[in-house]
Image (spheres, helix red, strand yellow):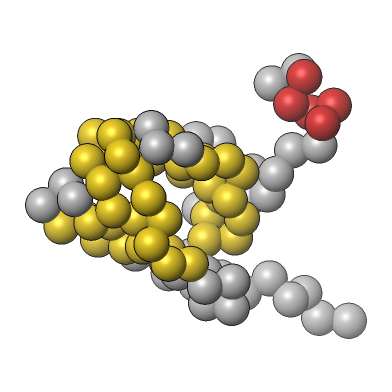
C-alpha cells in the first residue's frame, strides 16, 4: 500500500494586513474573531488579529481565505500536522 501523504507547497499571501490567503491547510482547530488556530502541511499555524473571518475554505484543495485586521501569524510545532487527542491537550 502506498503512503497517501502528498507533500505540496504551502503559500501564504497577505494583502495590506486585511486579506490572507493560505494553501496547504489540513485541519482547523479553533477560531473566533481574535484568533484562528489551524494545521498545515508544515505544522501548526495561529493567526491573531481583530474581527477575523474565514471567508472561504476548501477541504479538497486545502485553501483558505481570511479577512480582518491581521496582527500576527505564528508557526508552532513543525512535526505536528493534525489535532491532538484530548489527553495530548492536557499535557501540552
* Quadrant (top left/top right/bottom left/bottom right) for the C terminus: top right
Which residue is more in the foreground, 68 or 58? 68
Asked if 91 appears above or below 9 in the picture, the reply is above
* Quadrant (top left/top right/bottom left/bottom right) for the N terminus: bottom right
Residue 43 image position (x, y, % from top left): 54, 47
Asked if 61 appears above or below 72 in the picture, the reply is below
Q: Would residue 10 be found to the left or right of residue 7 on screen?
A: left
Residue 73 image position (x, y, % from top left): 33, 39
Q: Would residue 73 be found to the left or right of residue 45 on screen?
A: left
Q: Quadrant of residue 72?
A: top left
Residue that appears at 34% across and 44% down: 52
Asked if 16 appears above or below 4 in the picture, the reply is above
**Identity of the residue furthest to the bottom in this view:** 1
Residue that appears at 59% across and 78% down: 60
Q: Is residue 25 visible?
A: yes
Residue that appears at 52% across and 61% down: 25
**Identity of the residue furthest to the left in this view:** 16
Residue 14 image position (x, y, % from top left): 21, 55
Q: Quadrant of residue 4?
A: bottom right
Residue that appears at 68% across and 71% down: 5
Q: Quadrant of residue 41?
A: bottom right
Which residue is more in the foreground, 87 or 1? 87
Amino acid at each position: 500500500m502506498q503512503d497517501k501523504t502528498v507533500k505540496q507547497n504551502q503559500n501564504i499571501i497577505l494583502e495590506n494586513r486585511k486579506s490572507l490567503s493560505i494553501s496547504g491547510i489540513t485541519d482547523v482547530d479553533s477560531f473566533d474573531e481574535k484568533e484562528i488556530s489551524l494545521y498545515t502541511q508544515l505544522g501548526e499555524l495561529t493567526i491573531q488579529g481583530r474581527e477575523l473571518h474565514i471567508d472561504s475554505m476548501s477541504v479538497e484543495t486545502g485553501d483558505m481565505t481570511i479577512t480582518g485586521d491581521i496582527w500576527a501569524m505564528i508557526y508552532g510545532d513543525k512535526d505536528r500536522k493534525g489535532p491532538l487527542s484530548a489527553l495530548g491537550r492536557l499535557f501540552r
